[in-house]
Image: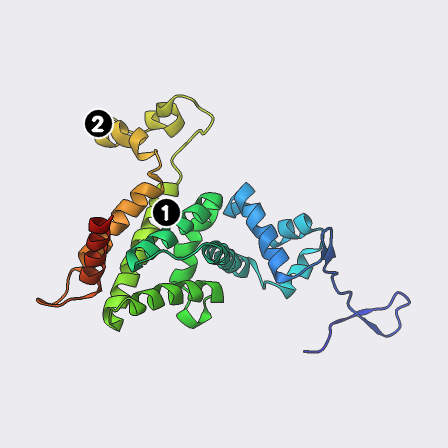
Amino acid sequence: MPESSARTSDGSGDAPARRASDRGKYGRLNRERVLAAALEVVDRDGLEGLSMRGLGAELGVEAMALYRYADGKGALLDGLVEAFFGELEAGLDVAPARRGWRAELDRIARAAHAVALRHPNVVPLLATRLLSTPLAARPLAVLRADERILALLVDAGFDGAKAVRLHRAFTAWLLGSLIVELRAMDADPDEPDPAYRLGLHRLPARELPRLRELAPLMAERDGEDQLSTGLDALLRRLAREEPEGSEGPERSEEQGESEGSEGS
């Protein structure tokens, strides 16, 4: 595409249009620095606080300079998903894997929970952005997370179909748990009284008596232990659905756990 041009100050001929500088307050930009700044903005101001102009101001550059690294807000949102999975991957790589496929999936789930607590405003994007992004177009960090789980299950002895089924169940439970736990509940976070903090006085008492009664309990976070307990129960149930007489990976792993407990 030919470079755009503008009239020179003396009116004679054309001059190349000024290119927005990508050297900001933190030095020359790169994709990692742009996404890190976008993540900081969303952590602080929420998704509605993210814009190309605002992010440019945060980095000390014009908004146009950011288009070399993200072609709009949609690309920034995709980049936040990439940053989330990149942080997850980095955390998993620094700690040793756990023995047994269920134990390792538990480690992955707990690590994802920790990242989600650090970046709760990004969690909705894990559903909305990936819902509309084809597999091959997803960020590499997202694909590596899928590869890690599928490889774990296949290496544990599950065939392809069962590995995919367990992968789907794991992903659905993890994502659903994070969204339910981190969804907005407080109408006035600074209000000490739970009823007023949740805005229960605005809910019709006759139509929603149980919701009004139990909303304070719903507002409490389950934490990673509840996430882990539910996930383990789900995976045990699915893995046991083997043809009669089969000695699948689940039975082998349980047998190993039983032998280990007897020897201790």
Residue, far top: 193
| Residue 114, image x, y percentages | 43, 46
Query: Is residue 167 something that shows in the picture?
Result: yes
Q: Local crowd at mark 1 within 10 Å, few (<14), some, or many (≥20)?
A: many
Judging from the image, the colouring scheme is rainbow
Image quadrant assignment for residue 92? bottom left
Quick one: which residue is furthest to the bottom in this view? 1
Q: Nearer the viewer, residue 156 or 29?
A: 156
Can you say which quadrant of the picture contains the N terminus?
bottom right
Instruction: Check residue 178 in the rendering and tell me which mark sits there, or answer none.
Output: 1
Q: Residue furthest front?
A: 263
User: Residue 225: x, y in percent?
Assistant: 32, 42
> Three-letter amino acid code at disc 1?
Leu
State the image coordinates of residue 223 (x, y, percent, origin top left): 35, 40
**Residue 256 image offset from top left, x and y in percent:** 22, 58
Dividing the picture into quadrants, the one containing residue 237 is bottom left
Residue type, label 2:
Arg
The disc, 2 or 1, on the residue closer to the chain's N-terminal end is 1
